[in-house]
């Protein structure tokens, strides 16, 4: 056990090669890339808040790894937040990465008075085994993209985690090392609130199904 958390990285994720549902009835890409982060962040936030009380302002941070793919997603349909009615493997990943941005942006609003910094990273494609379980179509597509090394991809995340100049920024979307404009839906305050509420409903249903 620990009595403090100064840094939370929401970095876990992956791609699928077909529609897969978890035992709780969730689409696997959405569950892995977004809802898992939503649950763990919610449960750790009280401890992160207590840490921030006795830490230098802006030094306690929550970092989300999203993707430029978030910008290619259609606006999330709150009647079908997991995108099941229009499912494709590539679209599922784009929606999940937009979910990361919307989660982070709403969390930033909720933590605005807590001296906790929230950042969103879209580092770009990295030459790793990340795409091993993606569809063949996706693997063919990424072969045409310029790839960073793992060290280059991690550099942005580390900068957001410890960079002194980032103490005063909050809820920002960083793409290729530069603060950028996120998906338009992630700038819609009402949409962010609605997305948070729908995420809470899905989590409650999933936890109820697994109990």
Image (cartoon, grey):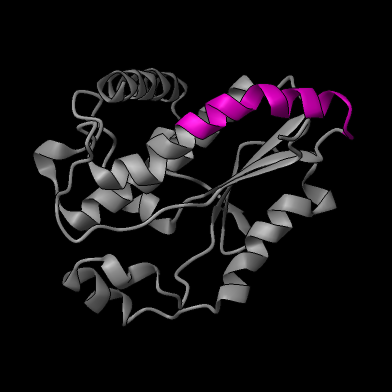
| Residue placed most toward the observer, 133 or 119 | 133
User: Is residue 105 highlighted in magenta?
Assistant: no
* 108 displayed left or right of 29: right
Give the main secondary structure of the magenta stretch: helix
The magenta stretch is 39-56
How far across and down, in percent of the image, does residue 154 sit? 62, 66
- Residue in the image at 23% along x and 57% along y: 90
Rendered view: 69 above or below 79? below
Residue 50 x, y percent position in the rendering: 77, 23
Q: Quadrant of the N terminus?
A: top right
Q: Residue at position x 88%, y 32% from top?
A: 55
177 to the left or right of 187: right
- Residue 127 vs residue 177: left or right? left
Looking at the image, residue 39 lies above or below residue 190: below
Horizontal and vertical percent position of residue 176: 57, 64
Residue 59 in view in this figure: yes
Q: Nearer the viewer, residue 146 or 26?
A: 26
Dividing the picture into quadrants, the one containing residue 159 is bottom right
Identify the residue at horizontal 75%, vertical 35% (top origin).
2
Classify the position of the C terminus by image quarter. Answer: top left
Q: Is residue 73 visible?
A: no
């Amino acid at each position: 056990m620990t009595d403090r958390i100064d840094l939370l990285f929401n970095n876990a994720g992956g791609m699928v090669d077909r529609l897969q549902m978890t035992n709780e009835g969730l689409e696997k890409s959405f569950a892995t890339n977004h809802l898992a982060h939503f649950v763990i962040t919610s449960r750790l936030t009280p401890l992160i808040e207590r840490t921030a009380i006795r830490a230098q302002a802006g030094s306690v941070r929550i970092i989300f790894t999203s993707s430029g793919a978030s910008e290619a997603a259609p606006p999330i349909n709150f009647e079908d937040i997991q995108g099941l009615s229009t499912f494709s493997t590539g679209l599922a990943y784009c929606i999940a990465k937009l979910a990361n941005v919307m989660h982070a942006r709403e969390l930033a609003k909720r933590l605005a008075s807590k001296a906790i910094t929230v950042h969103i990273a879209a580092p770009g494609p990295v030459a790793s085994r990340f795409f091993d379980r993606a569809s063949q179509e996706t693997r063919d597509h990424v072969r045409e993209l310029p790839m960073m090394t793992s060290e280059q991809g991690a550099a942005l995340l580390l900068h957001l985690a410890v960079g002194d100049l980032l103490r005063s920024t909050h809820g920002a979307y960083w793409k290729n090392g530069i603060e950028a404009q996120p998906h338009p839906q992630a700038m819609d305050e009402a949409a962010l609130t609605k997305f948070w509420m729908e995420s809470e409903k899905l989590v409650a249903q999933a936890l109820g199904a697994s109990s």
